[in-house]
Amino acid sequence: MKSFKYTLCIILILLLFQIAFSQDAKSIVQKSNELLRSKSSYSELTMEVIKKDWSRKFTMKVWAIEPDYTLVLITAPASDKGSVTLKRKTQVWNWIPNIRKEIKIPPSMMLQSWMGIKEMDGRTIPTHWEMIPEDKPGQKTVMDYLSIEFNAKIKESFFSKQNMKRVR
């Protein structure tokens, strides 16, 4: 009887492993994307840009309605505090408070792409991302999520050029 239970346990474990590891790459990426996506979100994060001879760290707040609307407020360092980036569908603007100027970003500058795992707002997600350019050794951009709220109550009207100058 013991050997039957032992054999049954092994068979069950093998079946579970087969089910768990039989996903293809497309379904793994899709599941990963689903963890990070929601109708809307509010998050706080840090981002550090590291070059060979210097680095710079930013802290920011991000509001988003997927996939068309995003507003990013820089909260640190002091020299960049208050700077805002707004994305509405395919258009992107920056607000630079020091010079009180709004700048439209051309689509050609939007071609750069942007992973530690932690539970936030009930989901286990990658919270530490490192982007390393293949052709630039010693350089990287590091991004760490500090918090995130999925399906946050955000109205589309929040994503306006006027709000770029008011958001805090």
Image: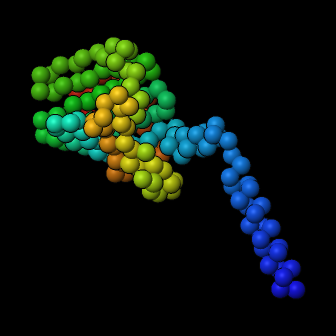
Q: Position of residue 96 (x, y in %)?
A: 18, 25
| Residue 46 left/right relative to 12 | left
Which one is nearer the viewer's eye here, 128 or 97? 128
Q: Position of residue 63 (x, y in %)?
A: 38, 37
At horizontal 24% and vertical 17% (from top left) the residue drawn is 103
Count of numbered labels shown in the rendering: 0
Rendered image coloring scheme: rainbow
| Residue 33 left/right relative to 62 | right
Q: Quadrant of the N terminus?
A: bottom right
Q: Position of residue 51 (x, y in %)?
A: 22, 35
Q: Is residue 121 above or below residue 151?
A: below
Which one is nearer the viewer's eye here, 134 or 168? 134
| Residue 55 left/right relative to 13 | left
At horizontal 73% and vertical 61% (from top left) the residue drawn is 16
At horizontal 44% and vertical 41% (from top left) the residue drawn is 41
Q: Quadrant of the C terminus?
A: top left
Which one is nearer the viewer's eye here, 54 or 67? 54
